[in-house]
Image (cartoon, grey):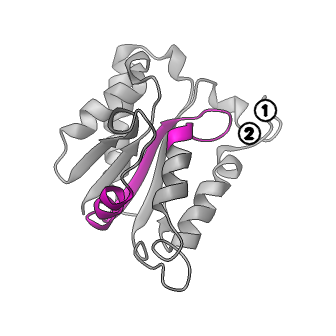
Amino acid sequence: MKTLVIAAHPNLSGSNVNKTWMNHLNREEDVTVHDLYSKYPDFKIDIEREQKLLLEHDRIVFQFPFYWYSSPSLLKEWQDVVLAYGWAYGSQGTKLHGKEFMLAVSTGGPEAAYQSGGYNHYSMSELFKPFQAMANLTGMRFLPAFVEHGVRTLNQEQVNESAEALIRHIKADF
């Protein structure tokens, strides 16, 4: 199975977790890591190139830090222009049907903050609903997300363990 990891971190040099995840994923066969912020620092997305990448892979992963209960802005822009009507959805938009989709997300806050009654009042499952709706609309199967909470408190050994756990998750049969 060929997997495309669409990574979106606006300050990758300042993110030990996301940078380590990408470095580990880059070593894996059948995994393509695509860093949106390095490819499109001007936000001018090559739609045809991006659609071609999607077609070449079976599993699509959005990797990003959780910013304001969503993804960083370039990933949202990517969704807006790449997942076009007539290509990704609509009566003729069937290009992604049958592909698998998952999230790989890091949060600064602890897991307890992302629960009903927690600091943020909502679970990650609830906060991920827009991504699940996107997968549903485009005909992709929404797979369980990989979430690493409290990344600011992890030491390097824990970050490396997280990267290995992410690889196992991305390659798992669901």
Judge whether 162 appears above or below 43 on screen. Answer: above
Q: Which residue is mark 1?
A: 118
Q: Residues within 10 Å of mark 2 (few under 14, many from 20)?
A: some
Give the left or right position of residue 66, taking residue 117 as reference.
Answer: left
Q: Is the residue under label 2 in contact with that under label 1 (CB below 8 Å)?
A: yes
Give the left or right position of residue 18, taking residue 28 as reference.
Answer: right
Q: Is residue 63 magenta?
A: yes
Q: Nearer the viewer, residue 47 or 98?
A: 47
Q: Residue at x 34, y 32 (%)?
A: 38
Judge whether 122 appears above or below 102 on screen. Answer: above
For badge 2, the amino acid type reads Gln
Q: Residues within 10 Å of mark 1 (few under 14, many from 20)?
A: few
Q: Is residue 170 magenta?
A: no
* Residue 154 picture location, percent across and down: 47, 17
* Residue 150 picture location, percent across and down: 57, 23
For badge 1, the amino acid type reads Gly
Magenta stretch, residue numbers: 47-74
Give the left or right position of residue 165, taking residue 106 as reference.
Answer: left
Q: Quadrant of the N terminus?
A: bottom left
Q: In which image quadrant can residue 26 be found? A: top left
